[in-house]
Image: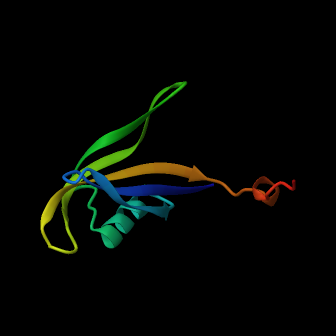
């Protein structure tokens, strides 16, 4: 079963999300390295808090929210940004699970 993190970027000044990516990883150290290399996200540097989701069986920790300064591409001005990092497990599906049913 594979593991991946969904990374969502949020402009907290403009109050909108502007991008989502998936990053597949094997270890947390591997993920931290990929985040730093690909997105400039340093899990040890940026202020972070835990992300939670409520389920029928209780509240679960599912990721982190990091706070940092982003930069607008068009003006170069800085803005407060949140980076939501949520974790998932994936497993292969059988073709019969995804084929469209015939009518």
Q: Position of residue 43 (x, y in %)?
A: 28, 56
Q: Quadrant of residue 60?
A: top left
Q: Residue at x 87, y 56 (%)?
A: 102
Q: Is residue 66 left or right of residue 57?
A: left
Q: Residue at x 77, y 53 (%)?
A: 97
Q: Residue at x 66, y 54 (%)?
A: 91
Q: Quadrant of residue 9?
A: bottom left
Q: Nearer the viewer, residue 101 or 7?
A: 101
Q: Is residue 84 left or right of residue 99?
A: left
Q: Position of residue 12 (x, y in %)?
A: 22, 51
Q: Nearer the viewer, residue 63 or 11?
A: 11
Q: Is residue 32 left or right of residue 1?
A: left
Q: Nearer the viewer, residue 56 or 26?
A: 56
User: Is residue 10 placed above or below 78 in the rendered structure?
Assistant: above
User: Is residue 1 placed above or below 78 in the rendered structure?
Assistant: above
Q: Position of residue 21 (x, y in %)?
A: 43, 63
Q: Position of residue 72 (x, y in %)?
A: 20, 68
């Amino acid at each position: 079963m594979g593991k991946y993190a969904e990374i969502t970027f949020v402009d907290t000044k403009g109050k909108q999300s502007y991008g989502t990516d998936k990053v597949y990883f094997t270890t947390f150290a591997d993920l931290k390295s990929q985040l730093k290399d690909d997105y400039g996200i340093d899990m040890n540097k940026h202020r972070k808090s835990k992300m939670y989701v409520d389920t029928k069986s209780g509240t679960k920790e599912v990721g982190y929210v990091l706070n940092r300064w982003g930069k607008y591409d068009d003006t170069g001005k800085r803005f407060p940004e949140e980076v939501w990092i949520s974790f998932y497990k994936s497993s292969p599906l059988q073709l019969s699970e995804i084929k469209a049913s015939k009518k």
